[in-house]
Amino acid sequence: MKILVTGGCGFIGSNFIRLVLDSRDWQVINLDALTYAGNPDNLRELENHPGYRFIKGRIEDAALVESLMGQVDSVVHFAAESHVDRSILGAGPFITTNVMGTQVLLDAFRKVGCTGKFVHVSTDEVYGSLGPSDPPFRETDNLRPNSPYSASKASSDLLCRAAWKTFKLPVVITRCSNNYGPYQFPEKLIPLMIINSLKGKKLPVYGDGRNIRDWIHVEDHCRGCLAALEKGRPGAVYNFGGNCEMQNIEIVHRILGILGMEDDRIEFVTDRPGHDRRYAMDASMARRELGWEPEKDFQQGLEETVQWYVENAWWWERIISGEYMKYYQQFPNRSKT
Ligand code: NAD
Ligand code: DAU
């Protein structure tokens, strides 16, 4: 099998490529624009792997995308602008990448006549927010996104649905809850709290800290994406979740506990506008149809993740200093337009 992975230099995409090359005898082409969130350090050890090829370029570049699609069977689409707070500051890049870019990929997949599947990696945030006693989200729920980020992801989900309905493109949509684990960019809650703790900085908790997320280890999510590619039903949507609903403040307390630090650096700050209160996922369809289940116990996964950030300070220090950006410059831009 030959696959095109988009956004493979990001957090989840890099973990996915590592899983594929460790467990399958496949060829992987990684198309990534190397935005601020794309970090070639994430896959350094695979640079010379015979099954791996990196192409620096944008998913909105139709000519480039078509030329790459002509070389693969299937696509696993991770590339996105992924941070809610950034989407509140400016929605433009979210529409360009998440909406326009996804349509370019769908069009190229159809034009070239790829014979495999198109796995679109989406998010629980497209469903909106739950009340305290609402049942978890199901795949049949209405989409009610509340941030520019989640609205752009919901738009891309609908474009994928339309490609299946109109052209019978074999699209499989996955919607996962909050990931944590190694190589997560330090703007997201868990790495930010770990790194700020290690650097003796304040720990900014939005609002009352009681917003709830359902946490899943990135390796569990990646196994789900692989199962969706290998066993997913074209046209289907699969929810993935970690069965681990937790308030943000509890996460911060646990990180401090693991590091053996006091709570006095926690600082309650102004809430995120439109902040979703609670997410929870019903992943019974993925269990039934894909035989998928999350495996990693949260406390164990969190301890391992804290340990990873402690041991890999070089990785996040190069991000904080901006040094990782310099490494970008050696990669030629493959734009064909
Ligand atoms: P990330 O921000 O860490 O990585 C995104 C990657 O996409 C980066 O490498 C970036 O360079 C690349 N990229 C951005 N714009 C591009 C473009 N126009 N062309 C090519 N490459 C581009 O994101 P992540 O957390 O790894 O998320 C990956 C996917 O999973 C996203 O689609 C996100 O919506 C989805 N998701 C994330 C989570 C989570 O908790 N992080 C949960 C569920 C779903
Ligand atoms: O649910 C899946 C989504 O999870 C993905 O689709 C997104 O790409 C990913 O970024 C993530 O979105 P969240 O907004 O839930 O993640 P974030 O890490 O930004 O925030 C998690 C929670 O922590 C949220 O309730 C906001 C809060 N928070 C976040 C930051 C960065 C804080 O309290 N303080 C912070 O400094």
Image: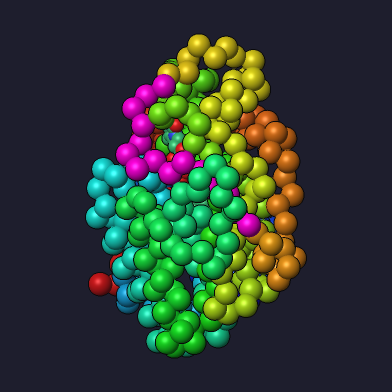
Q: Position of residue 202 (x, y in %)?
A: 43, 18
Residue in view at x 52 percent, y 76 percent? 171
Q: Position of residue 185 (x, y in %)?
A: 46, 40
Residue in view at x 73 percent, y 41 percent? 297
Q: Quadrant of residue 261?
A: top right
In the displayed image of the protein, which residue is found farthest to the front?
133
329 sits to left or right of 306: left
Residue in view at x 34 percent, y 27 percent? 270
User: What is the tally of numbered marks visible in this picture?
Assistant: 0
What main secondary structure does the magenta stretch of the protein show? loop
Point out the image quarter for the N terminus: bottom right
Residue in view at x 59 percent, y 23 percent? 253
Q: Which residues are magenta?
A: 268-282
Please check the rendered image and state whether residue 272 is part of the magenta-colored stretch, yes or no: yes
Q: Position of residue 89 (x, y in %)?
A: 26, 43
Residue 204 visible (yes or no) = yes
186 sits to left or right of 305: left
Closer to the camera in the image, 40 or 84: 84
Q: Position of residue 257 (x, y in %)?
A: 64, 20
Q: Is residue 232 above or below residue 70?
A: above
Please check the rendered image and state whether residue 274 is part of the magenta-colored stretch, yes or no: yes
Residue 222 visible (yes or no) = no
Q: Is residue 237 above or below residue 85?
A: below
Q: Is residue 206 above or below residue 157?
A: above
Closer to the camera in the image, 297 or 14: 297
